[in-house]
Image (tube, rainbow, N blue to C red):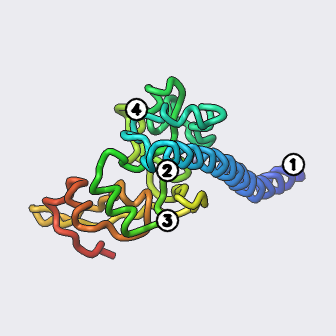
Amino acid sequence: MEILVAIAIVLTIAAIVVPVYRSSISQSKRAACTVNMRQIASAAQMYKRDNDDALPLKMFYDFRPLLSYLVDPALCKCPEDRTRHGVNFQAGAKLGSPVSYISVLTDEPVFMEKLTQLDPNYGLIACVSHGSRRNRTEGPPYLYDYYGPILRSRIDSSVKYVNWTGHCYKKKDGSIEYHRLYWGLFTDVDPPQEVVDLMSANEFERVPCPE
Ligand SMILES: [Zn+2]
């Protein structure tokens, strides 16, 4: 009986301590990620300053142009990213080490023009690894497998913890689909129609999300 009581007490304490411990770990990983993101964003700013105010073209696919401004390429990996090659595995393959961070679409003039116009303090890079991940058996983990909170590093060097939310679209067959646009990683401002068209949701009509 005493043993049972002792076990019950230990389990109760564990039930209290483990979640607190877990959340403090995830908080410290978030802090470490914030430091990484600040360094990468300032590397991008330095690159921009040295290159006629232009960010590296195709920054999403290739972080190498930032290397000469970064102390260590290992900064491109978020401590919360548990994937083997990094969530942005395309950039990771080019860099030769994992890349967790997702960059704005510097090779899409419409995207960049609207983003800078509508949100002067837009995000330069985002980290999706702090959210939840949908389980998929095939293929490497993909950006859209993640949902919920993200970290966004903005042009003024601040890092914001936000929810990457989506919008609902009515498909031709009448069904409603919840869809998160890449745009939402970098700003809380609603996407303009030009960007919705660009992100290939143009065949859908945007409708309020069902409760
Ligand atoms: Zn992160």
| Place of residue 42 in the rendered image (x, y in percent of width and height, measured from the top left) | 59, 48
| Place of residue 198 in the rendered image (x, y in percent of width and height, measured from the top left) | 22, 55
Q: Residue at x 73, y 54 (%)?
A: 24
Up/down of 176 relative to 11, above or below = below
Q: Secondary structure at mark 2?
A: strand
Q: Secondary structure at mark 4?
A: helix
Say left or right for 41 vs 166: right
| Place of residue 54 in the rendered image (x, y in percent of width and height, measured from the top left) | 42, 47
| Residue corresponding to mark 4 | 90
Q: Nearer the viewer, residue 60 or 28?
A: 60
| Place of residue 43 in the rendered image (x, y in percent of width and height, measured from the top left) | 57, 43
Amino acid carrying label 3: it is Asn
| Residue corresponding to mark 1 | 3
Q: Categorize mark 4 by other alpha carbons within 10 Å: few (<14), some (14-19), many (20+).
A: some
Instruction: Give the CA separation, mark 4 to mark 3.
Output: 27 Å
Question: Are discs 2 and 4 less than 8 Å apart at CB?
Answer: no
Instruction: Give the CA separation, mark 1 to mark 3.
Output: 59 Å
Up/down of 4 relative to 76, above or below = below
- Residue 58 lies in quadrant: top left
Amino acid carrying label 4: it is Gln
Of callouts 4 and 3, which one flags the residue occurring earlier in the amino acid sequence? 4
Of callouts 4 and 1, which one flags the residue occurring earlier in the amino acid sequence? 1
Instruction: In the rendered structure, find residue 125 and report the number of the disc placed on it.
Output: 2
Amino acid carrying label 2: it is Ile
The answer to whether the beta carbon of the residue marked 2 is less than 8 Å from any atom of ligand 1 is: no
Q: Viewer-nearest of labels 4 and 3?
A: 3
